[in-house]
Amino acid sequence: MTVAHAQSDMRQGYYSGATGILASALAWFVAAGVALLASPEKAVWALLVGGVFIHPVGLLLCKLLGSRGGHEKGNPLGLLAGASTFWLIFCLPIAYLLSTRQPSLFFPAMLLIIGGRYLVFATLYGMRLYWVLGLALAGTGMVLAPLNATAFAGALAGAVVEAVFGIICLASHRQWVRSAR
């Protein structure tokens, strides 16, 4: 399997990742709402728990939109996707522990972590859009951290960036499918 074929398979199987971005945006919006209506500590947990549901919700959206919600057996990029998931999980305790010492840094830290993970997606899907998304999230985290931004501001920033890029990725996928015909 060539790299180009593997990337095409990932794009076909996961709607170019657009559904995952949109599911992630939803988790960030929920965390922003919890930060606004409850507390920063509960918002941290809202994002952590919501994050557990990003992949299943993304797969459900894939299937609703006509993608299979998976990749071909033997696609080597599936291993890269799995490795990047473990990297993300390994970073979560760092962000959480940081939040116990300085709560205002949790959401900027998560923006950096998620942004870094999206850089890997540029290789998974063969789409430069993921470089822009990853750097936009990381840059947002870098700006918010020294400002001691509120949990609401941090979560809302993540939600808006992901929602915008999710919509762009959705449109990009549809155009890619049309051009492949």
Image (cartoon, rainbow, N blue to C red):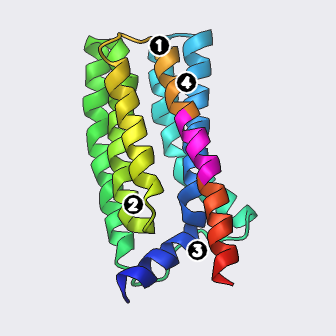
Residue receiving disc 3: 12
**What amino acid is at disc 1?**
Pro
**Image quadrant containing the C terminus:** bottom right
Main SS, magenta region, reads: helix
Kindly report which numbered mark, 1 or 4, lies closer to the viewer in this rendering: 4
Residue 40: mark: 1
- Look at the image and tell me whether residue 97 can be seen: yes
Q: What element does badge 4 sit on?
A: helix
Q: What element does badge 1 sit on?
A: helix
Kindly report which numbered mark, 2 or 1, lies closer to the viewer in this rendering: 2
Residue receiving disc 2: 122
Of the numbered discs 2 and 1, the one sitting upstream in the chain is: 1
- Spatial CA distance of label 2 from label 3 is 15 Å
| Residue 21 appears left or right of 151 | right
Q: Measured along the vertical axis of the image, is residue 41 above or below residue 19?
A: above
Chain part drawn in magenta? 161-168
- Of 75 and 130, nearer the camera is 130
Residue receiving disc 4: 156
Of the numbered discs 3 and 4, the one sitting upstream in the chain is: 3
